[in-house]
Image (cartoon, grey):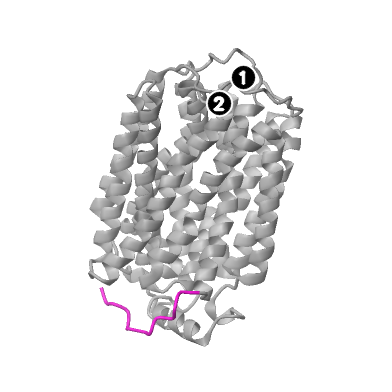
Amino acid sequence: EVSPTKQARAPACCSSRYGLAFLSCYGFFVAYALRVNLSVAMVDMLKNRSSVNNSSSVCPHHSIPVPKHNHTASVYDWDSETQGWILGSFFYGYILTQIPGGYLARKYGAKWLFGIGILCTVIFTLLTPVAADLGAGYLIAVRVLEGIGEGVSYPAMHAMWASWAPPLERSRLLTISYTGAQLGTVVALPLSGQICFYLDWTYVFYIFGAVGLLWFVLWAYFVSNSPSLHKRISEDEKTYIMASLKNELSPTTDYIPWTSILKSLPLWAIVVAHFSYNWTFYTLLTLLPTYMNDILGFSIQQNGMLSALPYLGCWLLALLGGQLADLLREKYLIRTVIVRKAFTIVGMVGPAVFLVAAGYTGCNYVLAIAFLTLSSSLGGVSASGFNINHLDIAPSYAGILLGITNSFATIPGMVGPVIARSLTKSNTIPEWQIVFYISAAINIFGAVFFTMFGKGTLQPWAVQRIHIR
C-alpha cells in the first residue's frame, strides 16, 4: 500500500468536510429516528396489551404502577404475524432503491438524492397515523414508501464521501457520519416511549417529522456535492482533499465495470459480513421493545430507555473505533486489511457470544440488559471493519458497491422480524433463545467469511485507465 503523498493536512476545526460529517450525522439521525419510532409506538397501538392486568409478561413486571393517561389515539387489533409484517415492511421499500441509489448518486450528485430521499421519509412519517386508521394494509404501504425514500441514503452518502473524505481520515469522517444512525436510535427509543406516555402514539410521528423538516432546510443550504463546488470552503482544504484523492478516483462517470464488480471476491466478502451483521442488528432493532415488554416485563416508558442502551453503547464504540482504526493505519502503519478484519471479528463474534448469553439469564433482567447492551456495543466496532471497506477497494464505485452489499443486507430486515415473530408465538424464553441462537450462528459465519476473503487495497478494476474502452 502506498501512503498518500504527505499533503499538509487542512485543520479539522470548522472545516467543510467536518461540517458535512455532522450534517450527514444529523441526516442519519432523522432517518433512523423515523425508522425505529414505530417499534416503540407499536407497543401502544395494540388493543388489550396493557388493559389485561399487568401480568401478561413472562417475568414479573417491574413497572411502578403509573396513572394511565386517558389516551385518545386509536388502538388496533393485529395478531403477531401482522405485527411482524408491519415492522418488516419498511425494508421491502428500502431494498428497491439501494443499487439505483448508488447509480443515481454517481450520475446526478449525492446532495439532492440524500436530501430528497429523507424528505420523502419525513412526509410519509407524518401520514402514518392516518394510514394506521385506514387499516394495516395502508400502514404497510406507507412504511414501504418510507423505505423507498430512505433506501438511497447510504449509497448516496458513500458516493458523497468518495469525493470528500481524504483516505487517511476515512474511518473518522465516516464513523461520525454514519453513527447518526445509532444516535437516532438512542434518542428515538426513549423519547418515543415518553411521547407515547405523556401525549399519545400519534405524536411520535408528528414530532420526529418536524425535526426531519428542519434538517432538510439546513442540508439544502449548507452542503455541496464536491469540494470544488462548495461555496464556503477554504482554498487550503479544497486543495488538501483533492490532492489526497487524485490517485484514487477514476476519471469518467459513465463507465461502470459491472462484470468485474460482480466477480470481485472481496466485494462478496463484504456482502456476507454485511448480511450477517444486519441479521442481528435488525432483529434486535425491531423486536427489542417487544422482548422487553413480553418477556422482561418493562412498561413502555422504561422500555424506551432500556431498549436504547444497546444502541448508546454501539454509538460510542463505533466512534471510538473509527478514531482507533485511523490511528493504527496512520501512526502505526498497520495494513488496512488487517485493521478491517480485526475490527470485523471483534464486532461480530463479540455480539454473537453475548446475545446467546442473554437468552440464558432467565428473569435476571439486570444481567439480560447488560448482555444485550454488550452485544450491541461490540457490534459498533465493525463500523470500521467491513462497513467502510467499500471505500478501500473501490472509492470511485463506493456508492454502487454499498448499494449492492446493502441490498443483500436488507434481506434480514425483511425476513428476520417475521421469522422471529413466528418462532415466538407463545412468547416463552426457550422460543427467544432459538431466535438468539440463529442470529449468533449467522454472525459468526459472516466474520469467518470476511476474514478469509476480504481485501484492503484498491482493486485493479476500480482504477480505470482511459484506454480500456
What is the span of residues highlighted in magenta in the rendered image? 1-13
Few, some or many residues within 10 Å of mark 1 (<14, 14–19, 20+): some
Q: Which residue is mark 2?
A: 299
Q: Is residue 267 magenta?
A: no
Vertical placement of 71 versus 52: above or below?
Answer: below
- Number of numbered markers: 2
Q: Is residue 9 visible?
A: yes
Answer above or below: position of 55 versus 7: above
Q: Which residue is mark 1?
A: 50
Query: x, y (%) of residue 52?
Result: 61, 13
Q: CA distance from mark 1 to mark 2?
A: 9 Å
Name the image quarter holding residue 173: bottom left
* Left or right of residue 123: residue 272: left
At x 32% / y 52%, what residue is drawn?
269
| Mark closest to the chain's N terminus, 1 or 2 | 1
Q: Pointers 1 and 2 in contact (CB under 8 A)? A: yes
Residue type of the residue flagged with mark 2:
Ser
Q: Which residue is painted at 29% across and 71% down in the image?
A: 330
Q: Mark 2 Cα within 10 Å, few/some/many (few <14, many 20+)?
A: many
Residue 81 drawn above or below residue 314: above
Residue 33 image offset from top left, x and y in percent? 58, 46
Among the 4 quarters of the image, the one containing residue 203 = top right
Q: Residue 144: give x, y in percent of width and height.
A: 63, 42
**Residue at (51, 57) in percent of width and height:** 154
Say if the magenta span includes residue 3. yes
